[in-house]
Image (spheres, rainbow, N blue to C red):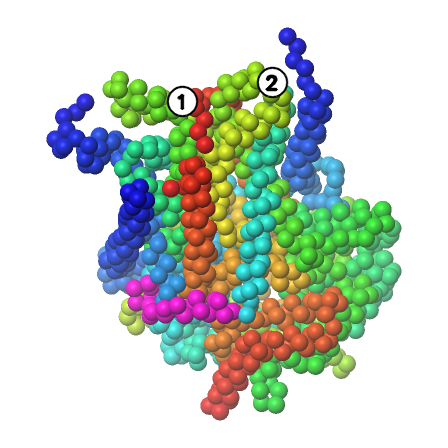
Amino acid sequence: MMKQESVLSRSFAIFNYALLGLMALLAILPFYYIILVSFTPISVYNANTIMLYPKGFSVEGFLHILQSKSIPRSLLNSVWLSVSGVFLYLALNILTAYPLAEKSLIGRKQIQLMITFTMIFSGGIVPLFIVVHLLGLYNSWWAVLLPGAVSAWSVIIFRSFFATISDEMKESARIDGSGEWRILASIVLPVCKPLIATFVVLFSVSIWNAYFTPLLFLDDIKKWPIQVILQQMLATNDDGSGEIIAMPSEMLKMSVTVVATVPILAIYPFMQKYFTQGLMIGSVKG
Amino acid sequence: MKTIRISPGSRISQMYKQRSFYLMLVPGVLVFIAFKYLPMFGLITAFQDYQPVKGVWHSNWAGIEHFTRFFTEPTFWRLTKNTFSIAILSTVFFFPIPIMLAVLLNEIRISSVKRIIQSFVYIPHFVSWVVVYGLLFALFTSDGLVNLILEHFGWRPVSPLTNPGLFKVMIILEQIWKESGWNSIIILAAITGIDPGLYQAAEVDGAGRFRKIWHVTLPGIMGTVIILFLLRLGSFLDTGFEQILLHLNALNRNVGEVYDTFVYQYGVLSGQFSYATTVGLFKSVVGLAIVMVTNRIVNRMGQEGLY
Amino acid sequence: MKASKRKLWHVSTSMLLVLAMGLVMVLSGCGGKNNGGDSQASQSTNPATVEPTSGGSSPTPEQPEEKTKISMMVVLNGSEGAPDKDGPFQTELEKLTNTELDINWVPSPVYFDKLSVAISADKLPDITMPTNMKEGAILNAIRNGVFWEIGPYLKDYPNLNQFSPAVLANASVDGKLYGLPRLRQLSRVGVVYRKDWADKLNLQPPASMEDVRNMAEAFVKNDPDKTGNTGLADTSSLLIDTAFPPSPEIYFGGPNKWGVKDGIVTPSFMYDEYFAAMKWFKDMYDHGYMNKDFALTNANQRMELLNKGKAGLMLGNTSDVNKMTALLAEKQAKDPNVKLEDFMGISVFKDAGGNYAPTAAGDGYYGEILINKKTVKTEEQLRKILAFFDKISSEEGQNLFYWGIDGVHYEMVDGKRARTDATNAMYKKEISNFLSVGVFQQDFTSAANKVTLGAMSGFAGLEIELHKELAKVAIPNVTAPFLSETYTKEGAELSKIWQDGVFQFIMGNIDEKGWNDLKDQWLKRGGQKIIDEYTAAYNQAQSSK
């Protein structure tokens, strides 16, 4: 049976494609420019005010970055931090959010209030520094990962997704004798794949991009993740004291951006296959 | 069923029944306490004459001296006006865009196109504000690309980077460009959670595309949207400090300076921690008030709020 | 009724709970900090702690004297990573000074933050070297006795006791010297210009503001690099950035940032001479001889514009000529034999009589080396540390710091020390970051500098000569030795009032009346207090002479 699509619907579709296409283009254009500049020879970049299309190809822009011995090590650090961090963060958030999705939990409102409170009030970086020292975590990966592991934002979003899962399913499982852990693992989580995929992306990106906390809490240069090393390159070039890199700082910024972001950009397309419709069973609840 | 020792129905017995839940909560709550609550002792410095050397425990008490100083700052009204207007503009114009983006994306039938567009629109999130500003510089200075094109056609050059009237517009547009794609990811996840059966039912009822959006998609994500909105309100007065700081110059300072840049100047650069904490505390209190009011409204409307 | 009562109970319980939790946190933090602050911290994982010399490692029988252990927090520049502590340089350094160095390398962008946090958390190592001690947490710490006042001890250390009275005055806080200032040239101010363009137009090196204007005008009108009408107008020629040239008012007869007028310490922007300078720049701007976007341009963007040939002149630091690397690369792509001196020139101003004209003097130093009183507990230990700095300030020490080890970090070429690619790489890896630990090495104009000059390329030789001459006539900022409470608290914010005004005037957004209004505003908002405080301090210093 042929479905008749109204003229309005079809013209909307065309308009939609055009609009979204335009947005995608606007989003990608600057990145195109960044890649363009970073792969241009220095002399060519300098001779032109603005480049719209490639003129000559060179990896000069990356030589300085890639020659640095700190890069491979810091890349490994970042990968390690991101991977282990994602597991840690997911575990903590899921375990905290799932009980809160249970409306009959005693103390639920109070705990949620306490969590919301942390979203609004913060003591600042110096007290955090002192606490990290107090707990003996200074100069360790924990200091970089733990403070951001759970936040009101992530817990509450997980909770609201969990809350959409029907109570009947959970109740019948309980009557069958399943414990909460089993329910969580076998009923709730499989259905939340898009949510988990989303947060894999969100968490890995935020850990990958972290710059200030690693700087502050990690004294050992060997432990530094890649953003710290890259920012250091940019800062030194800007600073001018110490060494003067034979590259315009704008161009260095581009190369640094490429190195810093290309690895992590791959995460989202990788996770996209989990974003299929209808995986979440249960009545829709506002 | 386990044997219950205390009288059935009492709170303790109920809590015992739910003990798995409490066990699950332990690690997360510990992290909250350790890394969010413990550091809150720093908030005391807003009421002290904080000397870093003396620490929090030995600095002299200053009462509300810093608050008075802040509210009587000659620039206070200007800062307040700038901060609130950017916050409101951002909430009104920036917040809905990721939602619209996600809904529109959902309407694309060809999945490969959908995936490609999705993968493109979130890329600006990864470009740092420093690089973004560098790009703006290349575009909008007197011999930047945009003005070259304008001159070519005989039109007047523009200077949005120095024009105070365009400052707020630029800030919001930049935020939209940079973060809409990224923020739409979570909405898209919410859309996938809508029962496809509902779409089929709507189809049977004769609903066209627009009806489906209105009656199925939007209500389906309403809960998530409300939560996201509430979460955003908690940081209502956070205006994006790095972005604004980069944009400030001699010509737009009057319209551009906000609480966050003020705190940076006094807190980080001048080392007046107490004063900076004061402003931060003030921002938090305003955020709290807004969240409490809105959360109550949401609860009254029958939706679940933050708490 | 019941429902709302229960709700009220719920809300109030939650409030009470939160409050209780908060109190518990604060109280536990209280006890925790008091205990953890001192005892735990010292032995914790923080490497920046020190053990007192006497209780340190057991002395090996071969060594006559125990090594002094020093912990430091040093700025890390570059991204090579920290120098290897077992590398040739650090080994040699430790041998020379009989020390064991425990160095915590901190990247320069966060050095200030980390230092502030360390002060707050009571985690300071023996030695720190902030670049500005007159504000924030550091000034605070100084005034609270965290650091040794080393002024009185200097006389016992011949190599260290070489600071000029001016630098000593500038580096003091409340009249006392708390750290070792790291010497820098007093002034490097001049003009950096495109020599190839100047040669084409038969222009002499600019020696005055008028010359600068003439050159800029010539560059604009006569299009020396013949890019002509490519649609990209070479409209600008003199480059200014947001930092504005150092005290341009001097060239018009004004003081350096602050001067004494009728016995009152007055900021330079209040002088008529300053307004004359502003009018000069406005004139340049209106004619198009100056970059239109100067209000947006930072130092890096300025260098990029000069490198791209969008302009031909720059007022500021003559050493910036070494940053023309991109243009050099571009030219060398066409002709590998091109050198920097072929197309770039530097010059300084001279007066009508051919004497070097005064320029703005900097403070003469860049940051100080501070010694922590809490970890360096006795005078004996202090003296050992001062001995370390004394040793590295000797001729042998200075040369080690500047040149490194023969064959490893430099080579002898034609009887002069020089750096080749290989040795330069080792130098950057091992030594360049140590330069900030040294006191005298970087100021070649000072008599205290005992570094053997090596083979010099490019502008190095000319720069040293010019900087020496500039140092003789540089005008100091009269308020440099003093502190004004109001300035420390509000100065930066207040300065924006008139600094923005300068830019607005040049761009034509405000007129003279508007400028005068801004000056009044500055006075009313706190400027008057600053003037009073500086004047009082100045008079006091004068009377005690």
Give the vertical position of C272 relative to B230 (above or below).
below
Name the one closer to the observer, B209 or A111: B209
Picture quarter with the C terminus of chain B: top left
The magenta segment is B52-73
Secondary structure of the residue carrying numbered label 2: loop
Residue C299 lies left or right of residue B76; in this view the side is right
Q: Which residue is mark 1?
A: A190
Who's the residue at 68% across and 77% down the image? C516
Q: CA distance from mark 1 to mark 2?
A: 33 Å
Q: Is residue C383 visible?
A: yes
Q: Amino acid at mark 2?
A: Gly
Q: Position of residue A37 (x, y in %)?
A: 68, 41
Who's the residue at 37% across and 77% down the image? C153
Q: Which mark is residue B254?
A: none
Name the one closer to the observer, C383 or C513: C513
Residue A78 in the magenta stretch? The answer is: no
The subunit letter for the residue under badge 2 reads B
Q: Which mark is residue B206?
A: 2
